[in-house]
Image (cartoon, rainbow, N blue to C red):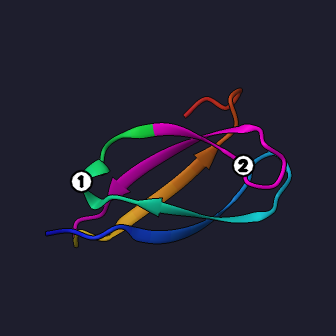
Amino acid sequence: MDYLQEQTLSCPYCGESIDVLIDPQDAGDQYIEDCQVCCRPITINVTTDSMGNLSVSAYDENDVY
């Protein structure tokens, strides 16, 4: 059983560090979560590297990725 992992990322709008809980089964997915500081929508991409480590990227709604 996989457990939720806490990841810290920077909001692309206000720059504040925020913590998000990531389910390892969400690797390869993206979702939208509001910033806990400025309340703007952040697109979050969840990926894994070749070693199986989770990686989280944050984009604003106007970024192309």
Q: Is residue 31 left or right of residue 9?
A: left
Dot 2, crowdedness within 10 Å: few (<14), some or many (≥20)? many
- Give x and y (percent) for residue 12: 75, 48
Q: Quadrant of residue 13?
A: top right
Q: Earlier in the sequence, mark 2 or mark 1?
A: 1
User: Circle 1 sits on which residue?
Assistant: 25
> Element under label 1?
helix
- Give x and y (percent) for residue 51: 22, 73
Q: Residue at x 78, y 42 (%)?
A: 39
**Magenta stretch bounds:** 31-50
Q: Residue at x 20, y 68 (%)?
A: 2
- Give x and y (percent) for residue 55: 42, 62
Q: Is residue 33 left or right of residue 11?
A: left
Q: Amino acid at mark 1?
A: Gln
User: Circle 2 sits on which residue?
Assistant: 35
> Element under label 2?
loop
Q: Mark 2 and mark 1: span between their CA atoms?
A: 22 Å
* Closer to us: 12 or 2: 2
Q: Is residue 9 left or right of residue 45?
A: right
